[in-house]
């Protein structure tokens, strides 16, 4: 009854099924491995974050450029505070507020002011207001805090808002700040361990791409899709075989002509 499986037409169908199922299983397994890798990266980032808080601060220059290995590490920088900016629309402890970011002009080997590093001195609740933000300390200061990579509009929870009032920026990025000041800005920023003047300290965030974000769960969703595809191919093959076999049986009994497989 099943000799039709050896016909040229069914050889093509069988070959497709034999190739399609392993491909679907392989792609599903690969997507699952990507999800597991992201879970492990999230665990490693959490453990590294705890370790970073216990480590002694290192000079800012030794941690640049910011990478997944240096992001979150304790950095130390000395200089003088200069321009101050507000970053609206930042949530902390489920409350809306804004960051107070001040550029710290570091000194060159010759003692002259050099590039600046953005320093998040703290968070305040409510709409961004320059009147609420405390002025930065005068004179030379040494700051210690967690080093962070420049934000992008694609970062989790970050919005590059347009049309902001003067003195406000949507993201903490060298690319956006360098256009507002007449000197260079380091590609990275520091969030103080202890906020200034009654503000709340902004906790360091995990490096971008190391957390259980939407992309991680997309990998998990794709895993299910590929395995469903494999099951669907197998289901359709059995259905076609059964329909062909029934048609041939009916033809032998004189009920109907043999059905043609699609």
Image: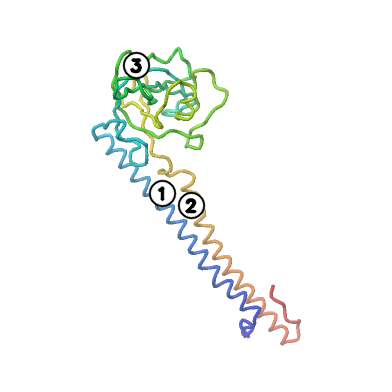
Q: Taking 202 as reference, is 237 left or right?
A: right
Q: Which residue is identified by label 1?
A: 38
Residue 251 position, x and y percent, is 73, 84
- Residue drawn where x is 39% and y is 39% of the image: 207
Residue 103 placement: quadrant? top left
State the CA–CA distance, disc 3 to disc 1: 38 Å
Q: Which residue is identified by label 2?
A: 219
Q: Helix, strand, or loop for circle 2?
A: helix
The reply to whether the C-beta atoms of the residues labelled 1 and 2 are less than 8 Å apart is yes
The reply to whether the C-beta atoms of the residues labelled 3 and 2 are less than 8 Å apart is no
Q: Taking 30 as reference, is 105 left or right?
A: left
- Residue drawn where x is 56% and y is 62% of the image: 229
Residue 94 position, x and y percent, is 44, 29
State the CA–CA distance, disc 3 to disc 2: 44 Å
The quadrant the N terminus occupies is bottom right
Residue 205 placement: quadrant? top left
Vertical position of residue 53 compared to residue 95: above or below: below
Q: Nearer the viewer, residue 80 or 19?
A: 80
Vertical position of residue 246 compared to residue 75: above or below: below
- Residue drawn where x is 56% and y is 26% of the image: 162
């Amino acid at each position: 009854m099943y000799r039709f499986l050896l016909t040229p037409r069914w050889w093509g169908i069988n070959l497709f099924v034999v190739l399609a199922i392993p491909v679907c299983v392989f792609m599903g397994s690969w997507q699952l491995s990507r999800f597991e890798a992201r879970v492990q990266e999230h665990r490693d980032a959490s453990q590294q974050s705890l370790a970073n808080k216990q480590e002694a601060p290192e000079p800012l220059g030794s941690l640049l450029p910011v990478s997944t290995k240096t992001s979150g590490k304790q950095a130390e920088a000395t200089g003088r505070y200069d321009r101050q900016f507000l970053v609206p629309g930042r949530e902390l402890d489920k409350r809306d507020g804004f960051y107070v970011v001040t550029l710290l002009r570091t000194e060159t080997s010759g003692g002259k002011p050099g590039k600046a590093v953005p320093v998040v001195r703290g968070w305040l609740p409510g709409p961004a207001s320059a009147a609420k933000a405390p002025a930065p300390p005068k004179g030379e200061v040494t700051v210690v805090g967690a080093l962070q990579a420049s934000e992008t509009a694609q970062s989790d929870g970050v919005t590059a808002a347009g049309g902001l009032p003067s003195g406000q920026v949507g993201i903490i990025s060298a690319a956006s700040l360098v256009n507002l000041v007449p000197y260079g800005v380091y590609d990275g920023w520091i969030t103080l361990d202890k906020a200034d003047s009654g503000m709340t300290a902004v906790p360091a965030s995990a490096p971008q791409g190391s957390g259980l974000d939407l992309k991680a769960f997309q990998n998990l969703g794709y895993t299910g899709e590929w395995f469903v595809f494999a099951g669907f191919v197998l289901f359709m093959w059995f259905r076609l075989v059964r329909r062909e076999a029934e048609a041939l049986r009916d033809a032998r009994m004189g009920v109907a002509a043999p059905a043609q497989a699609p």
